[in-house]
Image (cartoon, helix red, strand yellow):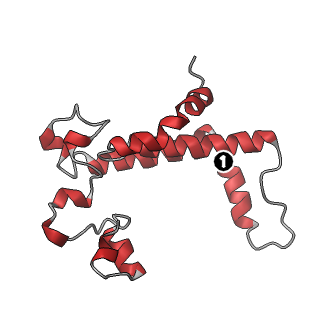
């Protein structure tokens, strides 16, 4: 992430271009292998994907594209289908420019639902991150008890 700043390319356009956000990747900057354009870690450093054969792990269309699609599908399913947020989304969308809106989280149930959606979305994103490494574990390890409570495991 610091590469644009190290190279002196501090424009927002260059930063976003190299951040993997748009899929543009590094374009071989500093002689980096192509797989760094779509993976977060080398397979030997991964905490979740070490069981996948190496030839599959480093092939974009066999691994990275599929887990990113799964991440998106899981979030869409949880948000729009399981939690049935579709009507509320359309209501807020159509009322965007109405004056005197009453927006925000007003009840405990709304707060719980919002927290659950955010935590489960975050956890599914981390779980399906192509190449999640040990550093990711430190980011979400503290959320495991909350996550287990939310999905109802004993």
Identified at 39% across, 83% down, the residue is 11
- Above or below, 33 against 125 in this view is below
Which corner quadrant of the image does residue 51 belong to? top left
Rendered view: 81 above or below 26: above
User: How far across and down, in percent of the image, does residue 123 sit?
Assistant: 49, 41
Q: Is residue 53 left or right of residue 22?
A: left
Q: Which of 20/137 is in front?
A: 137
Looking at the image, residue 8 sits to the left or right of residue 72; the answer is left
In front of the other: 137 or 122 = 137
Task: Please identify the quarter of the rendering in which residue 16 is found.
Answer: bottom left
Q: The N terminus is located in which quarter? A: bottom left
The kind of secondary structure element at disc 1 is loop
- Residue at the spot 34% in from the left edge and 76% down from the top edge: 5
Q: In this view, does 71 lie to the left or right of 147?
A: left
- The residue under the point 76% across, 66% down is 95
Whether residue 84 is visible, yes or no, is no
Binning the other alpha carbons within 10 Å of mark 1 as few (below 14), some (14 to 19) or many (20 upward) gives some
Report the residue that reaches farthest toward the right: 100
- Can you tell which quarter of the image residue 150 is in? top right
Residue that lies at the very extreme toward the top in this rendered image: 154
Side (left or right) of 36 relative to 66: left
Residue sitting farthest toward the front: 6
Q: Name the residue under label 1.
A: 85
């Amino acid at each position: 992430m610091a590469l644009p700043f190290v190279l002196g390319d501090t424009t927002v356009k260059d930063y976003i271009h190299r951040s993997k956000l748009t899929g543009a990747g590094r374009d071989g900057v500093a002689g980096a292998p192509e797989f760094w354009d779509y993976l977060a870690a080398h397979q030997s450093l991964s905490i979740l994907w070490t069981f996948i054969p190496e030839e599959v792990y480093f092939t974009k269309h066999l691994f990275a594209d599929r887990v990113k699609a799964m991440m998106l599908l899981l979030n869409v399913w949880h948000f729009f289908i399981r939690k049935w947020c579709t009507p509320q989304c359309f209501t807020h969308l159509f009322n965007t420019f109405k004056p005197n809106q009453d927006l925000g989280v007003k009840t405990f149930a709304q707060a719980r639902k919002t927290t659950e959606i955010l935590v489960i979305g975050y956890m599914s994103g981390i779980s399906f991150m192509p190449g999640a490494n040990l550093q990711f574990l430190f980011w979400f390890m503290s959320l495991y008890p909350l996550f287990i409570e939310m999905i109802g495991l004993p």
